[in-house]
């Protein structure tokens, strides 16, 4: 039987505005169970570099019924933090066997890159 691991999705939630009326964000971690983690294929690595200018390291398969926002979020697994990039690819739940119907790609997370994205 195939089973995934529990990952921590770290959503950034807007908590207010600063003195210049820019949004202020706070990390809101939530555990998501049964996520499949696989190394990115060589095709995924080449495609992600061509399309997004980013190097895919892992592909995550998200369980059916998950309602979390995965686009441009941080996720923690294997004692490291990763950054989700690109658009999630989702299939019709009823037409897909097994427990997963969406996949996302992650790249290595770098603190400076995230802060620049969050403040823009």
Image: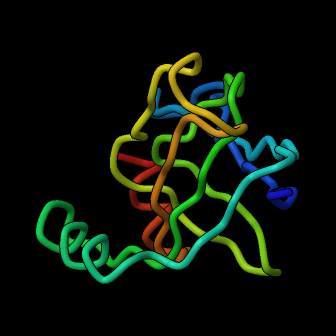
For the N terminus, the image quarter is bottom right
Quarter location, residue 7: bottom right
How many numbered badges does the structure rendering display? Answer: 0
Q: Where is residue 63 shown, x and y percent of the image? A: 71, 38
In this image, 29 relative to 16: left or right? right
Q: Is residue 18 in view?
A: no
> What residue occupies the far top of the structure in this picture?
94
Q: Which residue is drawn at 53% across and 79% down?
A: 39
Residue under the image location 71 percent in, 22 percent down: 65
- Report the front residue among 60 and 99: 99
Residue toward you, 80 or 118: 80
Indicate left or right for 118 with 81 as reference. Answer: left
**Would residue 74 appear left or right of 1 to someone viewing this image?**
left
Residue 19 at x, y = what percent? 54, 33
Residue 55 x %, y % = 33, 78
Relative to residue 100, is residue 105 depicted above or below?
A: below
Residue 28 vertical position relative to residue 14 in the rendered view, above or below: below
- Tell me if residue 104 can be seen: yes
Give the quarter of the image for residue 82. Answer: bottom right
Q: Which residue is drawn at 50% across and 56% down?
A: 84
Identify the colour scheme used: rainbow
Q: Residue at (59%, 72%) from the top-left corner?
A: 38
Q: Report x, y in % for residue 103.
A: 50, 47
């Amino acid at each position: 039987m195939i089973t995934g691991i529990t990952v921590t999705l770290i959503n950034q939630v807007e908590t207010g505005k600063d003195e210049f009326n820019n949004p202020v964000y706070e990390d809101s971690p939530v555990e998501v169970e049964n996520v499949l983690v696989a190394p990115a294929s060589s095709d995924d690595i080449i495609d992600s570099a061509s399309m997004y200018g980013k190097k895919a390291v892992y592909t995550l398969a998200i369980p059916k019924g998950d309602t979390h926002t995965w686009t441009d979020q941080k996720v923690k697994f294997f004692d490291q933090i990763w950054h989700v990039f690109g658009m999630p690819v989702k299939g019709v739940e009823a037409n897909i066997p097994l427990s997963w119907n969406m996949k996302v790609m992650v790249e290595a997370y770098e603190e400076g890159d995230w802060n620049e994205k969050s403040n823009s």
